[in-house]
Amino acid sequence: MIPVTEFRQFSEQQPAFRVLKPWWDVFTDYLSVAMLMIGVFGCTLQVMQDKIICLPKRVQPSQNHSSVSNVSQAVASTTPLPPPKPSPSNPVTVEMKGLKTDLDLQQYSFINQMCYERALHWYAKYFPYLVLIHTLVFMLCSNFWFKFPGSSSKIEHFISILGKCFDSPWTTRALSEVSGEDSEEKDSRKNNMSRSNTTQSGPEGSLVNSQSLKSIPEKFVVDKSTAGALDKKEGEQAKALFEKVKKFRLHVEEGDILYAMYVRQTVLKVIKFLIIIAYNSALVSKVQFTVDCNVDIQDMTGYKNFSCNHTMAHLFSKLSFCYLCFVSIYGLTCLYTLYWLFYRSLKEYSFEYVRQETGIDDIPDVKNDFAFMLHMIDQYDPLYSKRFAVFLSEVSENKLKQLNLNNEWTPDKLRQKLQTNAHNRLELPLIMLSGLPDTVFEITELQSLKLEIIKNVMIPATIAQLDNLQELSLHQCSVKIHSAALSFLKENLKVLSVKFDDMRELPPWMYGLRNLEELYLVGSLSHDISRNVTLESLRDLKSLKILSIKSNVSKIPQAVVDVSSHLQKMCIHNDGTKLVMLNNLKKMTNLTELELVHCDLERIPHAVFSLLSLQELDLKENNLKSIEEIVSFQHLRKLTVLKLWHNSITYIPEHIKKLTSLERLSFSHNKIEVLPSHLFLCNKIRYLDLSYNDIRFIPPEIGVLQSLQYFSITCNKVESLPDELYFCKKLKTLKIGKNSLSVLSPKIGNLLFLSYLDVKGNHFEILPPELGDCRALKRAGLVVEDALFETLPSDVREQMKTE
């Protein structure tokens, strides 16, 4: 007998695929096994037993005796011979009864075969084979989508990821921490929500919603008591799973081949069921126990008419009815499957019940084949979808990243990165991390926190532990903040620096920092920034004193004017965009420092002359050619610093002598050829930079500047220095390199406070030994060719080399 296991390969699939087999597929598989057993059993009987047994029919004598020959022939063929008489040589012990046919065994076999082929109905002959073939087709249809290359690869990948997600320790931890509340807590929360929904509508109801939203980010903070429950290896494995799920989702959601294939194979099974029911119902009656056989084999057997017995007719008849019952049940199940496939869309899957049960509100809905497989999984066990959903949640992923960050960045490791910044504050720079480690908030001595290129930064309430924090820098970071953390920053933060590529990276909460004193914005803003709603709220920064905008603004935003009453320093660094409509500057009466850098200014803005409190003005990298308006600076009695460097100025007007309050003046990187002697009437100048121009002559009036401490004429065309220069005995820095000087006067020894001297790039042949009188000048502060340095006396060289 043929064992059923021989047909296992037709329906065999990987054991893991069982999760994609709903109850109806499992049920039809069992029905297929039952029908297969019917087919195999019938085929076995066909092979091992006689199919049909036939005997010749007795023919009655003819009524018309037309000829003697016919009568004698008929008698000869139908009348049995008299029994043999007993004799001594042939004794008869048993009396033979019945009709004698004179047919041997081979003739009977021949008759049986002929009648089986000619007289028996084809349905009665091939019924078991039909059952076997139909059942195998059913099995192939049920499992084809597991074997087809285009679908099996997706299924195998999905099953692999699903199993890892189900068994991952992170899944268990995430569900237990997010939704692992006591039943009493859940009931009380539900009761509170129901009361708020029934009795609160309006502002109070919205407050509840806002509070629940604000509480969500607190899930990012990893509980230290359970931090060790997930080791580093498990954390890395969970992180890799998140990436696999993302890529798999993008790949599978593109098409619906799995859904289409499952629908088609189900439709095919329904069509086959209808065909089987139709022809089997019509032909089952053809399976008869007695069959009349009329075959023309009289010349070989002597008989033409036979009566045959189909030995398995009764059994096949019962099996056929049983088979029809199984097929009917199978078909009805397939019809139910079609109903399930079409009564709602299976190309969309919502995790709403998971979101409600777990509290993870950001689990996205999915579509196409991804959705279809999840619907199939739910028929097996909804727990799979629930655990799988953890790896679709951005909240869960961020929480895992947070855990890995905390494991990687311990407080001791972070303290090794502490450094002092330009504001003389203890700063912690963090660059290109996946998030903000919670361990940062354990460094209580921290004064400045710098975050650079970190996406999805969440500032938790634990920032309140940093009592000394005063400065925060956000460079290309998207930041969210907890409400308690915002309250802390409103009271403590003094300096905020934001560097952004997109306006969306500007944190909206920064406009509520009422104690903020310095704000630095670096990034590309629209030309219509003055109408930008987000910057209009700068007026709420009541303590703001310094505002720096490094961008591409075309006019000063109105929001800046709104804070002009307390603004003391404003810096606008453009990228070359022309800054127009500067009349708003007149309203900034308390402004003491103003920087308009790279703003494509061709003239000094007249609005600047109205800033009576102005002390420092920097017009670097503009397009200034004439500065005749400089005479108006005489009204700015407090102006001490004037920087007109990196422009195209060709001359200095004589009116500059009226700026008697100037202490620092920079004309470097211009096209000045002549220095007016009136310049040196500004006798309070301590810092004078004339480097990178075309100056050939230094007027002797420079000796008037008795307060001069810094003087630079680097990269000019000066051929000699006036001796009056050495009357400036407070001079500490002297830069005369890259000129056409050939002699350095011995009077340089009068500059007793000189600590930095640059003479490199001239035509000196020897240095005066009087340099030894400059006791503050050391070798590190002397910029000169090595060969020229060797011309100094050895004692002078040794003096400069000693610290």
Image (tube, grey):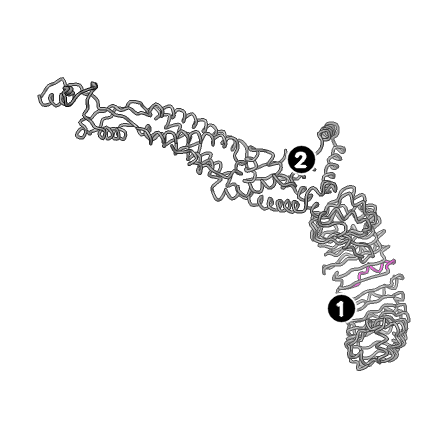
Asked if residue 428 is positioned above or below residue 189 in the image, the reply reads: below
Instruction: Give the camera-side residue of 12 and 539.
Output: 12
* Residue 801 is at least partly visible in this image: yes
Percent x, y of residue 251: 56, 45
- Left or right of 520 in this view: 352: left
Mark 1 belongs to which amino acid? Answer: Ser
Question: Residue 225 falls in which quadrant of the image?
Answer: top right
What amino acid is at disc 2? Thr
Q: Which residue is mark 2?
A: 358
Question: Nearer the observer, disc 2 or disc 1?
Answer: 2
- Evaluate if marks 2 and 1 touch, with contact meaning CB atoms under 8 Å apart: no
Q: Is residue 497 above or below residue 283?
A: below
Q: Please, what secondary structure does the residue beneath circle 1 have?
A: loop
Tell me the magenta residue range.
Answer: 603-614
What is the spatial separation of the Cα atoms under label 2 and label 1, in whole angstroms? 67 Å
Q: Residues within 10 Å of mark 2 (few under 14, many from 20)?
A: some
Whether residue 611 appears in magenta in the rendering, the answer is yes
Q: Which residue is mark 1?
A: 648
Residue furthest out toward the top: 63
- Residue 723 position within the rendered picture, expressed as x and y whole percent measured from the top left: 88, 78
Looking at the image, tell me whether mark 2 or mark 1 is earlier in sequence order.
Answer: 2
Residue drawn 53% across and 38% down?
Answer: 16
Rendered residue at 25%/23% (across/down): 307
Residue closest to the eye, 11 or 275:
11
Quadrant of the snapshot with the N terminus? top left
Residue 785 magenta-highlighted: no
Q: Measuring from the top left, give residue 275's x and y in whole percent.
A: 39, 30
